[in-house]
Image (cartoon, rainbow, N blue to C red):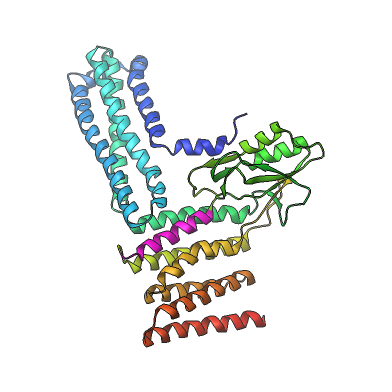
């Protein structure tokens, strides 16, 4: 049975070549199918396609669509290069896999192939008088679609590849992954606190990052074999040949065939993805801020924007955790660990705290953001946010030696200490 098909299908549909190929195939079919519909054309419409009207339109479309397609590809590559230079290479996948850009390029390429195939068919007398009418109508529809895509896509061009747009896309991808984990913190499995000592491990046979876990297949396999599985690694975890993917409790032992079926449920690749991996999104956002503070860029404003994005996604996630209903456990024989809140905060702020200690404006922004997070209704979130704030204040005091800077840092430190006391009293 083919495993991971929903995840693999999503990866395939994100490829530009696949989408462009589908549009190209549709263009060829629609061009050649015009002759099959000529029986539905009334005699009064035959004169509409008289002369060389269709030929001239298709010639113009063929020449212009090739230029437009080349321009669209070069624009996307320029955006990719700009994002790589000013943000982080890990964020560029969101630009390369942008659905709107793929659709625009695919439609442009499809229109070019449609016009070329139609011109070849016209030159071979493939169309009769009524077929030329159908071809003219199809050509008008294709032109309307191209004009509409150009108008819509031009609005995207002004922001494509910019730092602000890249941050926005990473934030949206991270918020989406966090929202999913708020609704399904253990992917429908039982929550796992610890692994039983009598459980037997199933080791990994690949090296890379876990991109997806087919929990549904594991659940059906566990029910069929009457076993319990304790999944040790979360999505985004790095595994190697000595890593344990799951631990199994089985009365009949674990056969090599069963181990192989379990391994097939784990999609392992050389890169992490934003899908169901919110920690990756948080680390990418943090990486954009860290690079902005490098001597080559020296852009504290971008780092401040990143702090705002990090605070926003974490606050929204906290609210979603509170408002979401307790999810039903779909897989009673599977056990999965919940995300550690401390890991999320470290992914988001640790690197920024280390790099921003010399930039007072960024320090102030992070102090404000962590103070907001420290007002969470969750005691654990308060504690972790205040711990991050203390680390930030300590590092900034060591780096900023000016009296004015020190006084500003001390003022924020008192806020953090007061909040800490309030939490302790509570």
Residue 244, image x, y percentages: 65, 46
Q: In which quadrant of the rendered view does residue 220 lie?
A: top right
Q: Which residues are magenta?
A: 278-295
Which quarter of the figure has residue 125? Answer: top left
Indicate whether 410 appears above or below 102.
below
What residue is drawn where x is 48% and y is 55%?
281
In depth, the one of 233 and 373 nearer the eye is 233
Foreground pick, 226 / 203: 203
Q: Is residue 121 visible?
A: yes
Query: Can you say which quadrant of the picture contains the C terminus?
Result: bottom right
Residue 99, image x, y percentages: 40, 43
Query: Looking at the picture, how far across and down is residue 216, in whole percent?
Result: 66, 40
Q: Nearer the viewer, residue 265 or 370?
A: 265
237 over 130 or under it: above or below: below
58 drawn magenta:
no
- The residue under the point 73% across, 52% down is 195
Marker count (numbered): 0
Q: What secondary structure characterizes most of the magenta part?
A: helix
Q: Residue furthest front?
A: 242
* 297 sits left or right of 213 in the view: left
Residue at x 47%, y 52% (from the top left corner)? 173
Viewer-nearest residue: 414 or 216: 414
Look at 79% across and 48% down and name the residue there: 198
Q: Answer with left or right where residue 197 lies relative to residue 134.
A: right
Q: Considering only vertical position in the picture, is 270 above or below 347?
A: above
Q: Could you say where residue 232 lies in the image, as x and y percent from the top left? A: 66, 50
**If the image is split into quadrants, where does the N terminus sit?**
top right
Q: Is residue 374 visible?
A: no
Q: In the image, 121: left or right of 183?
A: left
């Amino acid at each position: 049975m083919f495993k991971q098909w929903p995840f693999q299908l999503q990866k395939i549909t994100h490829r530009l070549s696949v989408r462009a190929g589908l549009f190209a195939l549709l263009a060829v079919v629609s061009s050649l199918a015009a002759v099959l519909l000529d029986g539905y054309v009334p005699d009064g419409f035959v004169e509409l396609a008289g002369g060389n009207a269709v030929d001239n339109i298709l010639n113009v479309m063929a020449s212009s669509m090739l230029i437009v397609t080349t321009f669209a590809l070069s624009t996307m590559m320029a955006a990719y290069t700009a994002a790589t230079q000013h943000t982080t290479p890990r964020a560029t996948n969101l630009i390369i896999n942008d659905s709107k850009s793929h659709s625009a390029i695919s439609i442009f390429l499809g229109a070019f192939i449609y016009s070329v195939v139609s011109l070849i068919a016209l030159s071979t007398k493939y169309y009769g008088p009524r077929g030329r009418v159908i071809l003219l109508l199809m050509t008008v529809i294709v032109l309307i679609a191209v004009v509409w895509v150009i108008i819509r896509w031009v609005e995207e061009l002004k922001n494509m590849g910019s730092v602000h747009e890249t941050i926005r896309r990473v934030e949206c991808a991270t918020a989406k992954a966090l929202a999913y984990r708020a609704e399904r913190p253990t992917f429908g499995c039982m929550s796992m606190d610890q692994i039983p000592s009598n459980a037997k491990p199933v080791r990994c046979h690949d090296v890379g990052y876990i991109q997806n876990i087919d929990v549904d297949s594991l659940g059906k396999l566990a029910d069929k074999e009457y076993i319990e599985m304790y999944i040790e690694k979360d999505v985004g975890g790095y595994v190697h040949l000595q890593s344990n993917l799951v631990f199994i409790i089985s009365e009949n032992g674990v056969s090599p065939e069963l181990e192989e079926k379990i391994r097939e449920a784990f999609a392992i690749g050389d890169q992490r993805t934003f899908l169901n991996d919110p920690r990756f999104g948080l680390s990418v956002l943090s990486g954009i801020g860290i690079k902005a503070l490098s001597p080559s860029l020296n852009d504290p404003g971008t780092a401040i924007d990143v702090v705002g994005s990090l605070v926003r996604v974490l606050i929204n996630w906290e609210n979603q955790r509170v408002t979401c209903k307790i999810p039903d456990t779909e897989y009673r024989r599977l056990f999965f660990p919940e995300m550690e809140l401390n890991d999320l905060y470290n992914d988001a702020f640790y690197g920024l705290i280390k790099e921003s200690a010399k930039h007072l404006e960024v320090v102030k922004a992070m102090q404000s953001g962590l103070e907001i997070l420290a007002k969470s209704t969750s005691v654990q979130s308060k504690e972790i946010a205040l711990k991050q704030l203390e680390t930030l204040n300590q590092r900034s005091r060591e780096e900023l030696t000016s009296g004015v800077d020190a006084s500003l840092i001390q003022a924020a430190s008192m806020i953090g200490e007061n909040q800490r006391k309030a939490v302790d009293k509570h």
